[in-house]
Image: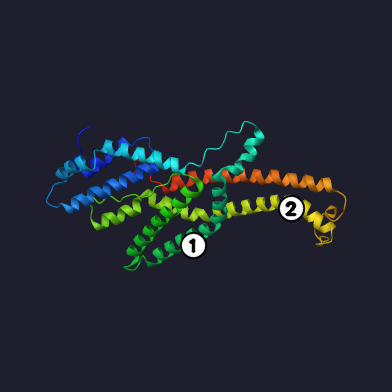
Amino acid sequence: MNAPRTIAEYLKQLRAALKGADPALIQDALYDAEEHLRAELADNPTRSEADMLAHVVSTYGAPEEVADIYRDQEIKIQRALRPPVMPKQRSVWGQFFGVAADSRTWGALFYMLLSLATGVFYFTWAVTGISLSLSLSILIIGIPFMVLFLGTVRALSLLEGRIVETMLGERMPRRPPYPSMDGKSFWQRVGAIFTDVHTWTTLFYMMLMLPLGILYFTVTITFLSISLGFIATPILKALSVADVINLQCGYPYWLCDNNYWPLAVLTCIVGILMLFATLHMVRGLGKLHGAIAKSLLVRIVGEAR
């Protein structure tokens, strides 16, 4: 492969060397490389871009070498993100109840409960920013305000990425997409923000989080409440029979009768099974949402920069 003579060529070769890698890894690598190269170019204004790249290749590394370094780092990152390996359960029941020992299950459960708050915040921020941007567009401060707003949306997407990666285990970028400024005027850079598909997919994700957050929170709370209520049936029955609590109104009559204990125990067993089924559902929703977040918050490899 020929030695790159421009920053754009270096990034193109780095992207090609990272072909097949995780899109989040590629986004991080391209951001770091472009930031480093432009900093080198700014620190050495007397050097041509080709001379600077020849020097950088000998210090920072050729695109292939940098790609290998990032792949090695990614292996370490994935090991850190991967939950402890649990003993493989051979029986169906072992796999069914083993979901409680998976740390990703509890991370997904917490994310489902948190998603309502984050969904309301993201939706409010997005709608308010869009409304103010459109209303101020007739004034001179309209475009600067919209650019600033879109910048905050990208910053929030990185925050959401950290939450998704920590709780759901989905690899997300640690760097934003680097806006290439090669030979572009100020207005061209502003226009690039509006024509970047990644900007609008990120904004769409912010607005999508409200209905998703309501759905995740409602489904999770509903099934957890029913499960825990069924599990607590024998305790409620015992307290009712002992006249510690009064369940005469609104509860099945057999809860207050000294008989029907087998039915109470059966209800408890159903509640336990439902609880573990809920944990499986939550873990599945976590994997699904991780895929949604990655498809909308990570720049697609090969997008125009």
Which residue bears the numbered disc 2?
Answer: 232
Residue 14 place in picture, x, y as percent:
29, 39
Q: In the image, which is nearer the foreground, mark 1 or mark 2?
A: 2
Callout 2: helix, strand or loop? Answer: loop
Q: Distance between the residues labelled 1 and 2?
A: 38 Å
Camera sees residue 251: no
Q: Classify 65 as above or below 272.
A: above
Relative to 303, is 234 on the left or the right?
Answer: right
Residue 82 place in picture, x, y as percent:
48, 41
Amino acid residing under circle 2 = Ala
**Observer-nearest of 77 and 225:** 77
Q: Residue at x 19, y 40 (%)?
A: 58
Q: Classify 229 as above or below 27.
A: below
Relative to 290, is 189 on the left or the right?
Answer: left
Residue 13 place in picture, x, y as percent:
27, 37
Q: Which residue is drawn at 49% across and 61% down?
A: 121
Q: Residue at x 38, y 58 (%)?
A: 150
Residue 115 is tagged as: none
Q: Earlier in the sequence, mark 1 or mark 2?
A: 1
Name the quarter where the N terminus is drawn.
top left
Residue 44 place in picture, x, y as percent:
15, 51
**Observer-nearest of 299 and 41:** 41
Within-10-Å neighbours for mark 2: few <14, some 14–19, many 20+:
some
**Observer-nearest of 145 and 25:** 25
Callout 1: helix, strand or loop? Answer: helix
Q: Which residue lies furthest to the left in this view?
A: 46
Do the residues under discs 1 and 2 have CB atoms within 8 angstroms?
no
Amino acid residing under circle 1 = Thr
Quadrant of the image occupied by residue 273? top right
Relative to 272, is 52 on the left or the right?
Answer: left
Which residue bears the numbered disc 1?
Answer: 124
